[in-house]
Image (cartoon, coloured by chain):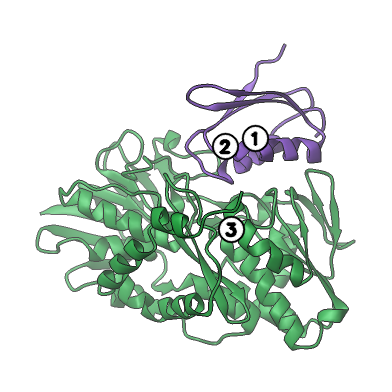
């Protein structure tokens, strides 16, 4: 039986494992943690104080017959097909899929470590999200600076989702008149992709969220409460909400040249095969594909890899489908693929309901039992079709 | 004349090219030449807005058959 080794029990790793035939493959998932988190909910923990349980044991999310090992991987040697763990020693494989996600790097920006420790954020982990809610719920007025500390973070819509939910919170608490929200971004506009900016920019304006475009964070002066950009601008804050830079895996990979300068693994954008290797894949946030780092890309990449390993020709199309909560009970989706630009898809209540439903059926998604629902949804929201239905005004 | 550093953003859709440009700018110094290759048409307006904001200079924007080429001189960093 051929051995498939999957490093990482996040969305991509679990979906891949659960879509392989256990009668034909000996499948092992390794993760340093026993728990899997539904990361999109960090947003609601940080801005709404949600107490929903969003973790499950990884072992409980795998089909019978798939092994789970708790171990911290320190080295992957692609040439020798050997993987070294801290606890359980050496693993061998016929196929390997690296699905280790991103790691937040608050030390990449001078001053950010102190903010990260004190205020948390809404991307890194559950503890940080709870920390941020403590500050958001205790906020009594002043200037809130919210944004990303580098161009590379996961889940592009989540940045503005944070600003929108924050504005809704301040309005509900009667603090809107005493507060300013400054949204800073390294991109030319509030939402990086122009068609979606066309949709959300009027909402940003109407809600009084001030946007600082081309603001790529350089340093943070914690003493004077100032964020400075490479472009030469400064923001003074009372409450800083800063998503740290995201980097790739810290695991040593041989050969080292398969990683780029931010530690993301160079992989083929259609097959996710690591450059130069037929039996090694990098999947989800840890690869360098020219697409967004989101759950749905990890999901669709995993489905394609499962097919490729099982001998069924398959390609990832670059499809993104990111739920985007615009607050006040509405949401939209950021939809595109390699060939088709982002759709200017308007927010509605139904889409918000779909986003919330997704949070409920997420656990089924990992096991593959929600596949028919997704197949229908993905064909219904095909970007070619949608771009015809919602053309961008010239 | 210094040789231009190539930023290859071909195949990346917006904001991929600007992400790559911002990253390259982080590692630049005054006098550097950057040459950006992209396929996403939005890059032209975005690169011009970027240059205006950062005080850097667009030397050339050229449409090759297979790519858009943008040459940038770093005047401020």
Is A241 drawn above or below residue A320 in the view shown? below
Quadrant assignment, res B35: top right
Colour of chain A as rendered: green
Residue A267 spot, x, y in % from top left: 39, 41
Q: Which residue is mark 3?
A: A196
The number of discs equals 3
Residue A373 spot, x, y in % from top left: 30, 72
- Labels 1 & 3 near each other (Cβ < 8 A): no
Measure the C-alpha gap from mark 1 to mark 3: 18 Å
- Considering every residue shown, the one lying at the far right of the view is A224
Q: Nearer the viewer, residue B43 or A72?
A: B43
Q: Are marks 3 and 2 on the same chain?
A: no
Residue in view at x 31 percent, y 76 percent: A364
Q: Is residue A148 visible?
A: yes
Callout 1: residue from which chain? B
Q: Which residue is mark 1?
A: B44
Residue in view at x 57 percent, y 66 percent: A124
Disc assigned to residue B41: 2
């Amino acid at each position: 039986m051929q051995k498939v080794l999957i490093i990482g029990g996040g969305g991509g790793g679990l979906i891949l494992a659960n879509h392989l035939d256990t009668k034909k493959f000996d499948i092992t998932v390794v993760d340093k943690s026993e728990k899997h988190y539904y990361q999109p909910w960090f947003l609601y923990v940080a801005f709404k104080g949600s107490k929903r349980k969003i973790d499950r044991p990884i072992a409980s999310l795998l089909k019978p017959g798939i092994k789970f090992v708790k171990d911290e991987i320190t080295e992957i040697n692609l040439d020798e097909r050997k993987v070294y763990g801290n606890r359980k020693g050496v693993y061998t494989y016929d196929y390997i899929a690296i699905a280790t996600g991103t790691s937040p790097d608050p030390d990449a920006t001078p001053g950010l470590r102190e903010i990260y420790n004190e205020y948390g954020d809404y991307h890194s982990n559950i503890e940080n999200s709870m920390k941020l809610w403590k500050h958001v719920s205790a906020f009594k007025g002043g200037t809130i600076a919210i944004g990303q500390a580098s161009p590379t973070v996961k889940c592009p819509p989540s940045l503005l989702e944070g600003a929108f939910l924050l504005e809704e919170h301040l309005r509900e608490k009667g603090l809107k008149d005493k507060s300013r929200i400054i949204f800073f971004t390294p991109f030319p506009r509030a939402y990086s992709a122009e068609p979606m900016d066309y949709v959300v920019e009027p909402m940003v304006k109407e809600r009084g969220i001030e946007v600082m475009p081309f603001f790529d964070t350089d340093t943070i002066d914690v003493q004077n409460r100032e964020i400075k950009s490479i472009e030469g601008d400064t923001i003074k804050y009372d409450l800083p909400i800063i998503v740290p830079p995201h980097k790739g895996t810290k695991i040593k990979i041989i050969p080292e040249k398969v990683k780029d300068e931010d530690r993301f693994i160079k992989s083929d954008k259609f097959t996710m095969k690591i450059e130069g290797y037929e039996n090694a894949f990098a999947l989800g946030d840890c690869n360098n594909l020219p697409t967004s780092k989101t759950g749905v890309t990890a999901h669709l990449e995993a489905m394609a890899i499962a097919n490729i390993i099982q001998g069924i020709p398959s390609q990832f199309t670059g499809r993104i489908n990111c739920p985007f909560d615009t607050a006040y009970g509405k949401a939209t989706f950021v939809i595109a693929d390699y060939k088709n630009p982002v759709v200017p898809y308007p927010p509605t209540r139904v889409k918000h309901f779909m986003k919330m439903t997704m949070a409920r059926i997420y656990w089924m998604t990992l096991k593959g039992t929600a596949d028919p629902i997704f197949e229908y949804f993905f064909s219904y929201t095909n970007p070619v079709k949608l771009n015809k239905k919602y053309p961008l005004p010239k | 004349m210094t040789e231009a550093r190539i930023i290859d953003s071909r195949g990346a859709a917006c904001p991929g090219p600007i992400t790559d440009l911002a990253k390259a700018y982080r590692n630049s110094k005054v006098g550097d030449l950057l040459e950006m290759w992209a396929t996403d048409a939005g890059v032209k307006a975005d690169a011009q807005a970027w240059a205006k904001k950062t005080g850097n200079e667009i030397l050339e924007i050229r449409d090759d058959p297979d790519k858009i080429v943008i040459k940038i001189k770093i005047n401020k960093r």
